[in-house]
Every structure is written in structure tokens, then in C-alpha cells.
Image: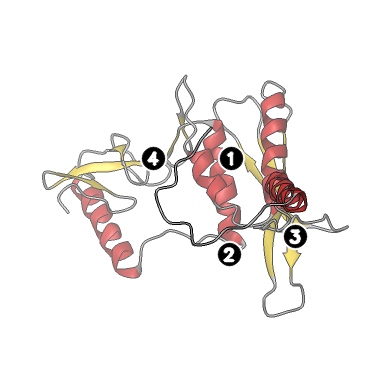
Amino acid sequence: MAIKIDKKITGYTLITEEDKLKELATEKNSVKHESEPNQKVVQLGEPLSRPDKLVGNTYKIKTPVTEHALYITINDVVMNEGTPQEHRRPFEIFINSKNMDHFQWIVALTRVMSAVFRKGGDVTFLVEELHSVFDPSGGYFKKGGKYVPSLVAEIGEVLEQHLQEIGMLKKPGLDEHQQKMVAEKKAEYLEKHAKSNSETESEGFPPGAQLCNKCHTKAAVIMDGCLTCLNCGESKCG
């Protein structure tokens, strides 16, 4: 194939066979380096090895969807023991029950959760993931009127409680002013309806209370023409 050169030639050089071999070797090396996996792998969390001794808590839950109670054990590993940075973090979880109906998925769930614990890093995201699981056949109300969308979500509540106890999560709650306001609202409502001999639930909420969308507790009542929760203080009127 002929190539027409329109510009004036000012210089030239010859490519020898040796130059061609060097160029070919350079291309092979670049392809080899691109195909090799990256040797500098960044590990977000160092996997934890199991010590001989662990500390933990066992929680008992009894739900309408299971005939027998479930016993949830969460064991923690102590990090930086003996230093000012000493703290606990979950290492493994076990769930035991006489009821074998949910045995397979419970074993699978606890093994996956334990693997996440041992991987290290932030494990608090598991609480939200478990809370978002809904039972297709419907949830249930636990003692105190709180709605639980599924058994998995209640396991998530136990994990949340445990993480709060060891300091990995902050305990949600009302401040002193809010607690005083809710107590006053509750006392005012019960006083107004005492004449009608209306009974209250075990937690002190009226039996006809509605489900609060914020705290998911059957404690919302109509006060002064506005739906107000007697548990968390949530009000449609602000």
C-alpha cells in the first residue's frame, strides 16, 4: 500500500528487528500486568479469630407465631482489653427453641449474622435490615401494644437492644421535657375518661387506642380533636 507524503521530509530512522522484539516484549508485559489481580487489597475490617472465652447475654422472646419461647444468645468479644479503648462487639449469635418449625431458616440466619459479626466493621446495619422484614401472613402485637411485622423483625429488636447495652447504638428516648409532657397528656386523658370506667391495658394505655406510626405502639388517642400518642408524644397537630 502506497502512502503519499505531502510534507517535506526533515529526518528519518530505521526500525531494526531488535527494536521490533523490544516493542513486542513491552506489549506482552503491559498485558500481563493488566490481567494480574491487584496485589494491594484494601481490607475494610480484619476478620476476628474466636478466643477461648466470650461474654454474652441471653434474651427470651415469646411470640404468638411460635408455640414455645425462643432463647437468643449473643456472645461478644472484648476488644483492646485492659486499655482505655476497651469495648465489646458481637461475635456470634445462637437461637434455641423446642419449636422445630423454623429450624432451617433460623440456623441459616444465625450463621450468616455470625459471619458478618466476625468480619468486623460496622454491623449495626443488620438491625434495620431485620426490622424491614414483613411476614406475608401478617405481624402481631407484643406485650405493651407494640406491633411487630414478623418474627425476624423481633430478632432484630433483640439485636438492637443488645447493641444499645454494649454501646454500639444509642438508646432512643425522650428528653426530660418530652417525658414530662407525655406524662401530663396521659394523666389528662385517663382523668377525663375515668368517669366512664374505661379500663387500661397492662402498660397503662386505653384499650381503644390506635397504632402510632412513629413508635408502632397502640397508644394513640384523640385529644382535643387531634390524634396524640401517649407513649412517644407524637401528634398530628404538632
Horizontal side, residue 68 vs residue 170: left or right: right
Q: At numbered mark 4, what does the secondary structure look like: helix, strand or loop?
A: loop
Residue 99 appears at what percent x and percent y?
70, 25
C-alpha span from label 2 to label 1? 18 Å
Three-letter amino acid code at disc 3? Val
Nearer to the camera, 199 or 64: 64
Read off the residue under disc 2: 167
Which is more N-terminal, label 3 or label 1?
3
C-alpha span from label 1 to label 3? 20 Å
Q: At numbered mark 3, what does the secondary structure look like: helix, strand or loop?
A: strand
Nearer to the camera, 105 or 7: 7
C-alpha span from label 1 to label 4? 25 Å
Residue 179 appears at what percent x and percent y?
33, 63
What residue is shown at x 51% (from left), y 35% (from top)? 2
Residue 155: which numbered mark, if any? 1
Which is more N-terminal, label 2 or label 3?
3
C-alpha span from label 3 to label 2? 13 Å
Residues under numbered marks 4 and 3 in contact, where contact means CB atoms less than 8 Å apart: no
Horizontal side, residue 21 vs residue 153: left or right: right
Read off the residue under disc 3: 77
